[in-house]
Each structure stands twice: as C-alpha cells, then as structure tokens.
Amino acid sequence: MTALVLFELADLLLPARCAGCRTGRTPLCPACRAALDTAVPGPATPHPRPEGLPPVYAATRYAGPVRHLLIAHKERGALRLAAPLGRALAAAVRPALGPGPALLVPVPSTRAATRARGHDPTLRLARAAARELRRHGHPVRAAHLLRHRRAVADQAGLTAAQRHANLHGALTARPGAARLLTGRQAVLVDDLVTTGASLAEAARALAALGHPPRAAATVAAVRRATGHPG
C-alpha cells in the first residue's frame, strides 16, 4: 500500500482539521482559504540571484498557515489542497504571462521523492493552476518537460552556493519537449522559492533547448524581494 493511499484512508477515517491552522472540522478553514485567495502576487527574486534565474513571482510568504498547507499537500498527501493552492499559483503566474499560449513547466521531483510521497506535488499544482487560468481565458497548459539525469543530495541545510553546485547540470529535457515549447512561452512553476537554485537549474535546462523561460512563479517565497507583498 502506497504512502498516498494511506494518507487518503486517514483523511477519510479521521475527523478533518484544517491543515493550515489545525482547528475546525474542515481540511481548509475559511480563514486559511482567505489567506490563499486574497494573496497579492509580486516579485520574489532571491538575493543573491543565481545566474540564469528568470524573474520570479510568488503569491505570498512561506510562513504561518500557508507553510503548513504546502507541507500538508507535499508531504502528507492532502490532495484536496491542490485546488486552492493551484489558484494561488495561478495568481502568481498571471503577471509572468505575455500574449499568446503558455506552458507551465514544473520543477520536477526526483523519482525517489515521487515514489515516497505517492505523487508529484509540483506537477499536481501546475495542472491545477493551468485549469484555473484556462477558466479565465488564458491559453495555458501544464507539461512535465523536465527530468533528473543524475542523483542530487538533499537540499536541506545547504547554503545557496552549495544548493547551486548540488543541482547544476542535474536536469534535462524529456523527449519531445522542444516540440511542445515551439510557439509557446514557458513559465517555470514550483511550490516554493528559497535560494532559487532549483528554478535556475530548470531555466538552464530549458535554455539548452533554445527555449529559455519567460519567468517563474511559485505559491510562496521564503525571502521577500523589494516590492513583494506581505
């Protein structure tokens, strides 16, 4: 039985509590939903800025209920949070879009992490964000275009420079990626930006195809750039 199935069974059998504030009897209480729905996106480029990192937009700060919601979705398989988190991600994508069709390209999880979690959380959020954007008339799709081509160390505890060295050259494009990108702007998406190392490596992999991303968007940012809300 996979970890995801176990989480889903627990979600059905145990009394629901808000994943953001751990109160109430609903997976997402009105106050925590409002924290996502009323977020005002803005620039969230880390400092120092990794080489090759495109402009980054985030919906909100990685703190409080938003932090708990992202962890619950990513690590505890709280899949019902994908829709509200996807709406927040869509809000961050909007200022990154130019005219014409776009592809949301999620930063990929490693195969080991996907197996352990039972799902790919960033791909799920990218698809939810794309659906939200299409409902509002934006010609946007999500596409799983990148993959890991070598093992990487756990990023936890690494400095910004160590994260960049750990990830540099780790990602490559999947077969057919260039064809899907032709005629479409690429926007990288992730759940969170900290040092920007993951997004910079994903940008490098797309640029190697001749399709550098227009921008990047995340649900939350650890560090707030000048002019970023919150």
Image (tube, helix red, strand yellow):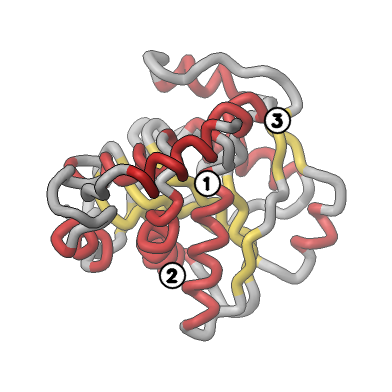
Q: Position of residue 173 (x, y in %)?
A: 77, 42
Q: Which residue is mark 2?
A: 94
- Name which quarter of the figure residue 165 lies in: top right
Query: What element does badge 1 sit on?
Result: helix
- Mark identifier at residue 148: 3
- Name which quarter of the figure residue 193 lies in: top left
Q: In this rendered view, identify the residue nearer to me: 184 or 1.
A: 1
56 left or right of 181 in image: left
Residue at the outermost bottom position: 137
183 left or right of 88 in image: right
Query: What element does badge 2 sit on?
Result: helix
* Mark 1 vs 2, N-terminal side: 2
Q: In this rendered view, identify the residue nearer to me: 204 or 172.
A: 172
Point 63% across, 79% down: residue: 100
Query: What amino acid type is highlighted by mark number 2?
Result: Arg
Point 26% across, 60% down: residue: 36
- Cβ–Cβ below 8 Å for labels 2 and 3? no
Regarding residue 161, the answer to whether it shows in the image is yes
49 left or right of 185 in image: left
Tell me if residue 216 comes above or below residue 196 in the rendering: below
